């Protein structure tokens, strides 16, 4: 499976939000920069939100150091990261959970921690998420797809995982699930059995860190001031392999054994 991850002809990395794939699988993206075809990075929840925003959303914008132009700014960060890694960007047209409303107009995920609870009963977005993934597969014809495992339990990560696994089964495309960062740094959630480690050389690791640095708004929100996020990623990647080598951990997707 490690060989497949590195040597697949064409890979599609399916990221819930701007920054997720690069923080979690940026090393593999860098390793695969010379693949037979240009890999693609699809951000599913990339519809640019417009006012009005909930109070919770505005608080998120403030934590990121951004204003109500947050969508355009985060998309620009994504382009900068993609330039470092040499990957083609694809954008979905689905709203991030914190901007989604129910049939009555109320916010579906309004409040700290709400996006890490089970999906709201009125959140009927899954068919659209699956449609975005299926359209990217038709365009790119990948022979490998990658998506989040769902560590941390973010509702959008779990939606993307379910959609990718579903499309992969339908199209007979193998799926690997990455270790969600930075959640894996903090939750220390035991992974599913059968995980495989992909070695990331020093040059590729440096490119992952450079690409991750492009997401300045998210690093500001996810880490405390003065916290050395690059050192945290470094320690985690070396600890996974049990050596001085950097590794990223992936799991072959098995819909019968994945946690719900």
Image (cartoon, grey):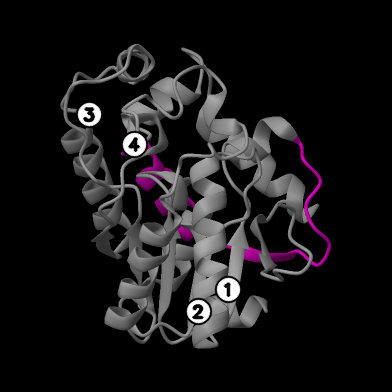
The residues bearing labels 3 and 2 have C-alpha atoms spaced at a distance of 31 Å
Q: Position of residue 134 (x, y in %)?
A: 38, 74
Choose the circle earlier in sequence order: 1 or 2: 2
Q: Which mark is residue 144?
A: 2
Q: Quadrant of residue 4?
A: bottom right
For disc 2, the neighbor class at 10 Å (few under 14, some 14 to 19, many from 20) is many
For disc 4, the neighbor class at 10 Å (few under 14, some 14 to 19, many from 20) is many
The residues bearing labels 4 and 1 have C-alpha atoms spaced at a distance of 26 Å
Q: Position of residue 219 (x, y in %)?
A: 42, 28
Q: What kind of element bears circle 2?
A: strand
Choose the circle earlier in sequence order: 1 or 3: 3
Choose the circle earlier in sequence order: 2 or 4: 2
Choose the circle earlier in sequence order: 4 or 3: 3
**Cβ atoms at labels 4 and 3 below 8 Å apart:** no
Image: magenta residue range: 188-215
- Asked whether residue 201 is in view, the answer is no
Mark 4 or mark 1, which is nearer to you? 1
Q: What kind of element bears circle 4?
A: loop
From the viewer's perspective, is residue 113 above or below residue 151? Answer: above
Query: For the point 16% across and 37% down, which residue is it?
Result: 72
From the viewer's perspective, is residue 72 above or below residue 56? Answer: below
Q: What kind of element bears circle 1?
A: strand
Q: Which residue is mark 4?
A: 215
Q: What kind of element bears circle 3?
A: helix
């Amino acid at each position: 499976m490690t060989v497949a991850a590195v040597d697949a002809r064409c890979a599609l990395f399916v990221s819930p939000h701007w920054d997720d794939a690069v923080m979690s699988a940026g090393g593999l993206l860098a390793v695969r920069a010379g693949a037979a075809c240009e890999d693609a990075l699809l951000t599913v929840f990339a519809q640019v939100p417009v006012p009005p925003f909930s109070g919770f959303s505005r608080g998120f914008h403030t934590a990121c150091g951004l204003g109500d132009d947050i969508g355009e700014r985060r998309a620009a960060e994504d382009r900068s990261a993609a330039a470092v890694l040499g990957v083609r960007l694809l954008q979905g047209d689905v709203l991030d959970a914190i901007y989604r409303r129910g049939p009555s107009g109320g916010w579906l995920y309004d409040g700290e921690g709400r996006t890490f609870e089970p999906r709201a009963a009125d959140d009927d977005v899954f068919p659209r998420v699956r449609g975005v993934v299926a359209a990217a597969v038709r365009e790119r014809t990948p022979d490998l797809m990658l998506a989040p495992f769902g560590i941390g339990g973010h509702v959008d990560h779990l939606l993307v995982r379910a959609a990718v696994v579903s499309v992969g089964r339908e199209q007979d495309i193998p799926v690997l699930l990455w270790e969600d960062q930075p959640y894996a740094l903090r939750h220390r959630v035991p992974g599913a059995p059968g995980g495989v480690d992909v070695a990331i050389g020093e040059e590729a690791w440096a490119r992952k860190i450079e690409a991750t640095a492009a997401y300045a708004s998210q690093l500001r929100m996810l880490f405390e001031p003065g916290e050395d996020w690059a050192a945290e990623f470094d320690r985690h990647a070396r600890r996974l392999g049990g050596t001085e080598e950097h590794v990223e951990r992936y799991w072959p997707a098995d819909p019968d054994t994945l946690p719900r």
